[in-house]
Structure formats: C-alpha cells, structure tokens
Amino acid sequence: MSVRRLAEPAVQPAAFAFNRAKSAEVKTWIKKYPKGREQSAVIPLLMLAQEQDGWVTKAAIEHVADMLGMPYIRALEVATFYTQFQLKPVGTRAHIQVCGTTPCMLRGSEALMDVCRAKIHHDQFHTNEDGTLSWEEVECLGACVNAPMVMVFKDTYEDLTPERLAEIIDAFAAGKPPQPGPQIGRVYAAPETGLTSLRDEKTVLKSTRDREAKAAARAAKAGAEAPVAPSNAAKPKTDAAETNPTLKSPSARKAAPGGEQAASVAPKIDKAAANAAEPSVEKSARQRTGPLKKPGPDAAYKAPEKLDGAPIGPSGQTDKPASAMRKPKKPV
Ligand code: FES
C-alpha cells in the first residue's frame, strides 16, 4: 500500500469546474440526500470529477468541498483515504489496480504484478510510453472469492492468470476494454465447477409455491375458525415496574429529575448517636465514626473474659495475685 498524497503542485491545474453534462449529474446526486445532509454526496461528486479529468486534482477537491459547504480537510480526507480516487495523473485508457491482499496474494497476485511491470512500467504510478496505461498495488477490493483479481476504474477482472491479464492489458492498450467479471466462465461467485445445489429451478420454485399455498390455506382456515391473538413469544419477562404494560407514562418522580435527585440524597448521620449505639451482638460500646479516641485510665481493668472465675485484663493483669491463681499440688 502506497502513501496517498496529492500530486506535486507542478502538475496541478489552477482551477476546476464541472462541464455541462457532469453538472446535471452533480445536481441529481445532491438531490438524493435530505436538506442539510448534502455533504453525503462528497464521494459521488469526487467520482464525477475523476471521470471528467481522469484523476482527482486539488482544485477539484476544493471545488467539491465549496459546493457542499464543507471544510477542505473533510473532502481531502475522503479523497486521500479511498484508493478508488486517483490523486495523480494515470494512464488515459486504463489504470490497473492489482489486489495484493492475502487471498489474492496466495492465489498469484505477485505474478500479476510481474505482468504489469513487464507490460506497463517497472514502477507503480508510472505510465507506459504512450501514457495510456499505469498500474498500482492496492488492498482488498472485495472480490476475494474470485482471487486473484484487478480493478480498472469501476470494473473488476477476476479469476485471473498472468496470461489472461496480459491479454486484458493488450485489449485496453488497443482501446477495446474486455468484458469484466470472472474470466473463467463462472457466473459471479458460483462454484468453478458449476452449481452443486439448487440446480433444478423448476422444482425449487414449485416446492416453494406449494409450501406457500399450503401455509396460506392453513392461515385462512385458522383465521375463519378463531381470531389469533398476537404472540408474546419474543417479549422478555420481567417484574420491573417500568415494563408494566398498563403504565402509559413514567412515574412522577422519574418525570421530575429535581425531585428524583432530592429523593436520592443520602440521609445525614448523627455521629454521636451512632457511637452511643450498642449492637446486640457486642457486649461493649465501640466507637464507629471519627478519629479513634484513646481509652481512659481504667479501660485496661474492664476485662470481659474470665479464667477460673477470675477476670483477665488486656495486658494480662488480674484482680488476684498470680500465686492465688495456681496452687502447686503436694507430692503424693
Ligand atoms: S484479497 Fe483480493 S479482493 Fe480481497
């Protein structure tokens, strides 16, 4: 893929204007888009400019941008992005774009490029001696199933061999463009060996007709017997209040964002009350909010646990002397 830049100023014409025939087409294209969306016509208008001059000049890009009331950079972005737009002069009879992306490369696009080098010019974007032919390598052109392929202006030539491409190039050089499409006789993208399924069109159409007639008869019979209620099969089941089919409009709270916001404000916390609260699972009060306060001087003596009936403090202190807690046994 080559870098896409505008041609050098030396080859750029000073101005551009659509001729009478193209002007009529321009109007037709712009009318296809709704009022205020005329800029959507940028691609067809650039294509018309290319058809008129053979390539898209800087003056043409700016002219199209002016017509559609869009910044030049927006039109430039489009023209420089798509390889369908030629940004410098190319062959007057054919500019061969060879797809070099993986499917085409695996099916022989390198050999096709060798043909272009031999018959047109060694380098891309250089015309032959007559100025009638040029070539370039491009990315996927969307006909991978019939790889390898080339595009010449708006036509694709598919299922190519080097020999067939050489013939196509000769035909363009002689001013006789060959028939585009698959070059091995297949129909569009059908299998190379011919259809493998749906081969009997009459049978297929007849079975389709029969099936449709039977379905219509069944529907008519069922309709005559009882009206069929609309199916709820695809409707999601949910208990959410918003999906209640009897609700015709949102609730008052949802309709008034201010009220909804006020209702969602977090309640104020009474820190003193929260600290004073004693959950039933705990035996002592515990501070829950604010910076931790240091325990009072007698806090160490309020031991919740007891050993052998004697309370134990956090630091291991007891209300009794250690000698009173454990009496040594007399030897027998
Ligand atoms: S890879 Fe060549 S057309 Fe898609």
Image (cartoon, helix red, strand yellow):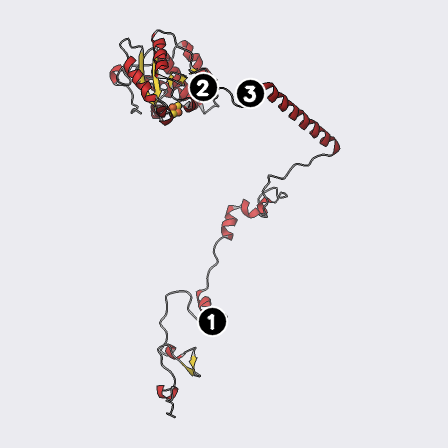
3D distance between C-alphas at marks 1 and 2: 79 Å
Residue holding disc 1? 282
The picture places residue 307, in percent across and down from the top left corner, at 42, 81
Distance from mark 1 CB to nearest ligand 1 atom below 8 Å = no
The picture places residue 125, in percent across and down from the top left corner, at 29, 17
260 or 75: nearer the eye? 75
Q: Is residue 263 above or below residue 19?
A: below
3D distance between C-alphas at marks 3 and 1: 84 Å
Sooner in the amino-acid sequence: mark 1 or mark 2: 2
Q: Quadrant of residue 56?
A: top left
Q: What's under tag 1, amino acid-wise?
A: Glu
The picture places residue 72, in percent across and down from the top left corner, at 34, 23
Look at the numbered disc 3 and give the secondary structure of its residue: loop
Q: Quadrant of residue 21?
A: top left
Disc number lying in front (3 or 2): 3
The numbered disc on residue 199 is 3
